[in-house]
Amino acid sequence: MDNIEISELEKKLLYQFKDKKILEQALRHSSFVNEQIDSNLQDNECLEFLGDAVLSLVAGHILMKRHPDLNEGDLSRMRANLVNESQLACIARSIDLGSFVRLGKGEVQTNGRKKNSILADTFEAVIAAVYLDSGFDATFKLIERHFSEFFDSIAASAANHDYKSRLQELVQVALKVMPLYRVTHEKGPDHDKTFKVELKIDEVVAEGIGKSKKIAEQDAARKVLEILKKNIKTDG
């Protein structure tokens, strides 16, 4: 790869490598290495192995922080949905990673640059390359940034199941009222808005924040549930 290609990929990753050679290895598929005369070239399979482990650790860390009330089984299922081949390939496509992968002639002819398996494996190798180049914190930021849409989507799904629906069931039975949600603030450009939503149930008020109205509503529902649970314990 030339410096222009590396620089272009670094811009898409929003990360600049100190050691460009580790990135070059991350982009080398075994089919490419097998066709080269230089036997010292290494493919990206070991990096893929390491990247898979690092991604699993970071995803688990973020999910545990975002959903401290969920059990190990729920967190494991959420992580599996987050780091599967399809999701990884989707993120790889969003940064056009396929254009930078070094493939053998056979893989090129069979549209290897578009295969989910190759895209996912290469993205894991790139994650490992960042980890080896700059350590855990830089890798954490890279994963959090590129997976943000999926973390938010999972948060919305989890919150809808565990918070908003549960809250509605609770207040309808115990308080005979309906939760009232109201958007109080929006900020940011259309493609990256942040919403604040106020939720009021009798005298209980909480504010939720999220990258969509639905996520903000669900965040507010979670906070009201916590307040109501504390009140129930205190009363008891």
Image (spheres, rainbow, N blue to C red):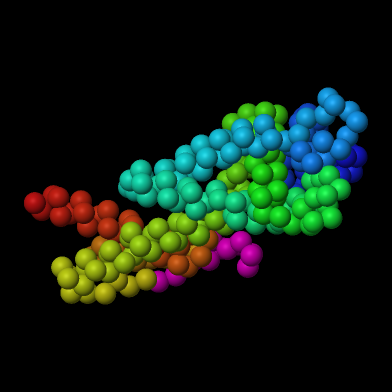
Q: Position of residue 161 (x, y in %)?
A: 35, 62
Residue furthest to the left in view is: 236
Q: Is residue 126 above or below residue 183?
A: above
Looking at the image, residue 194 sits to the left or right of residue 133; the answer is left
Is residue 191 a member of the stretch shown in magenta? yes
The image quadrant of residue 139 is top right
On the question of residue 204 being in view, the answer is yes
Looking at the image, residue 105 sits to the left or right of residue 187; the answer is right
| Quarter the N terminus occupies | top right
**Region rendered in magenta:** 182-194
Looking at the image, residue 75 sits to the left or right of residue 230; the answer is right
Q: Is residue 116 above or below residue 164?
A: above
Identified at 18% across, 74% down, the residue is 176
Identified at 76% across, 41% down, the residue is 29
Q: Position of residue 110 (x, y in %)?
A: 80, 56
> 84 or 69: which is nearer to us?
84
> 132 or 189: which is nearer to us?
132
Q: Is residue 153 above or below residue 13?
A: below
Is residue 20 a member of the stretch shown in magenta? no
Q: Position of residue 71 (x, y in %)?
A: 33, 46
The image quadrant of residue 48 is top right
